[in-house]
């Protein structure tokens, strides 16, 4: 069995979206002839803990954990956060509007911690892994980011050992949707671009999750980028032939995942208000936001007078998500209203599709998420300037007016984790033989 070293910041028992991609690849790699060796921090700052994910770690797998020093204890003290509060990726403030100290912290983050706050793990990791790989050779090395410090670890090892290297971008680097919010100096911006270009040009292969992300990376790196999307694991979704578990006394709209301020569309909340006044929905409508929600989202809900309809559920173990998606009447998929939003192809979309529940999206109609949703024929992507009346009509179309889900001949299995791991295996084999 060939060995692949996977350098990843996120690994169980850490939960959240960042862990899913390479946990699922690792789950199915052994049956494709590859033995995963995971290198990950012993004490990472993760959005949630989810011990249920550990069931997906295969027996044929080695996990190496090493301590990491991160500046988050200082950040929490400086911004007045509690010790137990997690630091969210991107820009999501759950309990309050960001103040001056938060803005200073963002400036420090963008300009001093390049590429990110995990930079202090780069040198010790290069030193340890170089020694480890000389004693325990791997056939291919994979780095996955963000955080993009993982790529710089792999870059350092590449310089020393010349091991075949695949750089996986779950999100773009300088093309990420919140890059312009980092308040970068010219020097910091140039350094981010230089490091990104170095990774893109020195990796043997570069892979990312969507076509628009690939276009951005190809532009920045001047090379071809492969696309292997995220997907769904049938083991997480339950029996697709089982009876629906929907409550006939309610009409439930669910969103799963982080709801930051860039996904908070006031027109959606006004549409919910109109739906609640309609005779078909009155006293039946329920909206559930499962995952962390920005303070701006809570404020919008209160301003619309929807406190009694909307439930905020901080975190649900991933093993329960499939049932929640299947038992909903409608799934909501807002895409960030930010630059480069066309590149956002959120992983939950594939689980939405696998559930068979209709999907209402809001975002760029020519983006990657709209493309996947359109191909699946299970929902619609509305423009972000869609009126409340337009949203209401779309809900009726999806749910009550014979909207036909799943296009005839559409094969959702191409997005199964098993099928995607087979594609990854082909890429790894190619890199191995080229090396």
Image: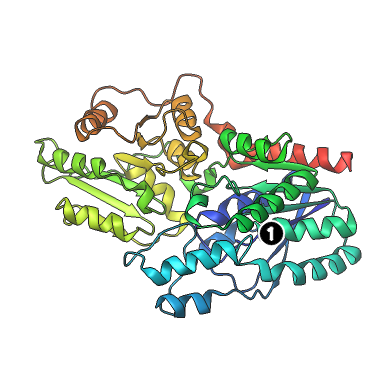
The image shows residue 262 at horizontal and vertical percentages of 38, 49
* Front residue (pair 174, 150): 174
Farthest front residue? 186
Q: Quadrant of residue 61?
A: bottom right
The image shows residue 238 at horizontal and vertical percentages of 46, 45
The secondary structure type at the circle numbered 1 is: helix
* Front residue (pair 410, 71): 71
Whether residue 114 sits left or right of residue 81 in the image: it is right
Residue 48 appears in the figure: no
Q: Is residue 183 above or below residue 165?
A: below
According to the image, label 1 marks what residue? Answer: 150
| Residue under the image location 36 percent in, 68 percent down | 99
Q: Quadrant of residue 122?
A: bottom right
Residue 431 appears in the figure: yes
Whether residue 383 sits left or right of residue 121 in the image: it is left
| Residue under the image location 42 percent in, 36 percent down | 241
| Residue under the image location 24 percent in, 40 percent down | 267
**Quadrant in which the C terminus is drawn:** top right
Q: Residues within 10 Å of mark 1 (few under 14, many from 20)?
A: many
The image shows residue 116 at horizontal and vertical percentages of 60, 62
The image shows residue 166 at horizontal and vertical percentages of 75, 47
Whether residue 134 sits left or right of residue 175 in the image: it is right
Q: Quadrant of residue 282?
A: top left
Q: Is residue 285 above or below residue 71?
A: above
* Front residue (pair 76, 85): 76
| Residue under the image location 74 percent in, 50 percent down | 199
């Amino acid at each position: 069995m060939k060995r692949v070293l996977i350098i990843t910041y996120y690994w169980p028992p850490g939960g959240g979206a960042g862990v899913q991609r390479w946990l699922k690849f690792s789950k199915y790699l052994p049956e494709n002839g590859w033995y995963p060796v995971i290198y990950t921090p012993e004490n990472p700052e993760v959005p949630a803990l989810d011990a249920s994910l550990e069931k997906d770690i295969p027996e044929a797998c080695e996990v190496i954990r090493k301590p990491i020093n991160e500046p988050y204890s200082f950040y929490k003290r400086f911004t007045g956060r509690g010790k137990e509060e997690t630091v969210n990726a991107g820009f999501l403030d759950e309990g309050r509007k960001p103040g001056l100290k938060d803005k200073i912290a963002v400036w420090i983050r963008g300009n001093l911690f390049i590429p990110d706050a995990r930079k202090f793990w780069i040198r010790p990791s290069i030193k340890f892994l170089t020694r480890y790989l000389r004693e325990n050779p791997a056939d291919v090395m994979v780095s996955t980011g963000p955080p993009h410090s993982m790529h710089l670890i792999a870059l350092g090892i590449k310089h020393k050992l010349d091991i075949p290297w695949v750089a996986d971008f779950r999100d773009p680097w300088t093309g990420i949707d919140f890059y312009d919010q980092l308040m970068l100096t010219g020097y910091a911006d140039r350094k981010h671009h230089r490091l990104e270009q170095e990774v893109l040009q020195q990796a043997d292969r570069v892979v990312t999750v969507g076509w628009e992300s690939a276009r951005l990376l190809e532009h920045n790196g001047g090379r071809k980028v492969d696309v292997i999307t995220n997907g769904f694991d049938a083991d997480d979704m339950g029996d697709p032939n089982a009876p629906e578990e929907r409550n006939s006394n309610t009409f439930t709209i669910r969103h799963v995942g982080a709801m930051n301020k860039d996904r908070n569309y006031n027109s959606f909340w006004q549409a919910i208000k109109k739906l609640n006044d309609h005779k078909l929905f009155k006293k039946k409508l329920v909206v559930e936001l499962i995952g962390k929600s920005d303070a701006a989202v809570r404020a919008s809900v209160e301003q619309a007078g929807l406190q009694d309809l909307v439930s905020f559920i901080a975190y649900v173990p991933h093993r329960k998500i499939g049932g929640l998606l299947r038992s909903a009447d409608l799934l909501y998929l807002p895409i960030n209203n930010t630059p480069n939003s066309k590149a956002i192809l959120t992983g939950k979309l594939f689980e939405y599709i696998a559930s068979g529940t209709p999907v209402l999206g809001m975002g760029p109609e020519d983006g990657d998420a709209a493309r996947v949703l359109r191909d699946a024929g299970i929902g619609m992507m509305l423009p972000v300037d869609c009126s409340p009346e337009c949203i209401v009509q779309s809900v009726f179309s999806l749910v009550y007016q014979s909207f036909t889900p799943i296009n005839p001949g559409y094969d959702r299995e191409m997005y199964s984790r098993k099928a995607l791991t087979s594609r990854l295996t082909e890429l790894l084999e190619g890199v191995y033989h080229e090396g």
